Image (tube, rainbow, N blue to C red):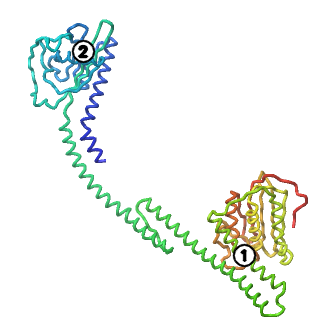
Amino acid sequence: MLACLWIFQTAFLELCYTGIKLNQVKNCAATISASIKNGNDTTDTINYLSKENEMSVYVYNSTEAIMVQQYASDYNNPTGRSEMAMHKAYDYYRLAYKNGGKYITTAPFSDESRHKIISYKTIGSSDDEVAGFEIDINQRQTPKTRSNIANMVYAEIMNLDEDNECFLLISAMITPVNAVVNTLRVQLTIVSVIFVILSIVLAFVVSRHISKPLGEINTAVKELARQNYDIEFTGSGYLEVKELSDTLNLTRQELKRVERLQQELIANISHDLRTPLTMITGYGEVMRDLPGENTPENIQVVIDEANRLTSLVNDMLDLSKLKSGAMELEPVQYSLTDSINEIFKRYGKLREQEGYDIQFIADKNAIVFADEIKIGQVIYNFINNAVNHCGEDKKVIVTQKVSMGKVRVEVTDHGEGIPEDKLSDIWDRYYKVDKVHKRGVIGTGLGLSIVKRILDLHRAKYGVKSKPGSGSTFWFELPCKATFPLQKPKQQ
């Protein structure tokens, strides 16, 4: 800012002043020219513009060989005769004539323009045939005092009609700005010193109110990077610093929460991995060491536990792929109703041997456009979750309804339910409502987090309705492409 002030108020001051004066002269000339061409009485207009803009205005009748002054207003000599040296007027007339009727120039001030003219030079005279004239020197200033003063002169030849011609001459004194520039330099020097001092003071204040809190926040962030989640961010002062502190405190709390949930997940997965491995090892040693223990039942236990390990590993891989975005959808058009019926075949053993009552109720055969394998995984995980948390009646109901172009699938159990304040957390990949780990009847415990990411990829609506002691209902919706009547009620 100071540099701009120095440049514009010292280096360019004279240029700006000259440009403004030039526009002033041109505007006055246009006003006077219009007034003369309209045939108005121009005396008052000339006197007003001359006084208002500090310039001398002369209007000549240039139709005859010798120009005759018609109007004049000499701002520089208001009490004397308002005349310009006639030979100067002729010179400007010739220059205007050569330049198409208009001419403007800036020339050093000449006291000759202040002289009283006795005889005149005609337009037709050459430079060697100048008519004699006498000069009555009436100088009010010495040449020394006027050496730096310049005149801006505007000349215009106006053709009023075929027989009349008028010549307008405007002279404006351009005051030298050297003294003003020197004054401005002194003032700018003082202002620059003041601003530099204020800048130093401001920098000191800013360093204490912004830099110091930012330094403290930077130190705390380094501690946070070292997994010290007990650090507190206490930035204050400016609003932005406080908002940054609040955001970092929220980040710290979330990281601390995720760290705790990760530890719980690792503990749960370790338990789930250890149990089937222990059973596989135990049954394998029994079949190796004891004759007659190599029975189909014992072998089936080993196979079941190996399958449980496979399911756990696959779920962990799926969750990792979904989280990283590496898993992509492969949508096809298929029957969602038939797909659910195929999934139900996996639960035949639970229904026959464990006494579970798992039902599927559908109103129509619904056709959808989605990834059949991943939507099947969603339904399978919903059912597994319901089986693991169903009540004493061991009853799970799967319902399919088609309405307004949407197919809605609901999985309901009659278990312990979920508290309202926990409903938004159950989809977290590290969250468990029951903190006491127990081995589920079926599944790996990662199902809901996988479900959430698959349904998000499909941009499907989903949710849960639950009350403690009244069971839970998990649901999702997909666009229905077509429906067909059921051949027979689908109930198992």
Q: Amino acid at mark 2?
A: Val
Residue 255 rendering spot, x and y as whole percentages: 55, 70
Residue 292 rendering spot, x and y as whole percentages: 84, 91
Q: Is residue 290 above or below residue 23?
A: below
Q: Quick one: SS at disc 1? A: helix
> Alpha-carbon neighbours of circle 1 within 10 Å: few (<14), some, or many (≥20)?
some
- Image marks 2 and 1: residues in contact by CB distance under 8 Å: no
**Please, which residue is most extreme toward the top here?**
163
Q: Quadrant of residue 159?
A: top left
Q: Quadrant of residue 80?
A: top left
State how far apart marks 2 and 1 are (Cα): 109 Å
Picture disc at residue 310 = 1
In this view, the residue in front, 78 or 277, is 277
Q: Earlier in the sequence, mark 2 or mark 1?
A: 2
Q: Is residue 192 above or below residue 47?
A: below
In this view, the residue in front, 283 or 50, is 283
Q: How many marks?
A: 2
Residue 249 rendering spot, x and y as whole percentages: 50, 67
Left or right of 211 on screen, residue 225: right
Left or right of 136 on screen, residue 23: right
The residue tagged 2 is 59
> Alpha-carbon neighbours of circle 2 within 10 Å: few (<14), some, or many (≥20)?
many
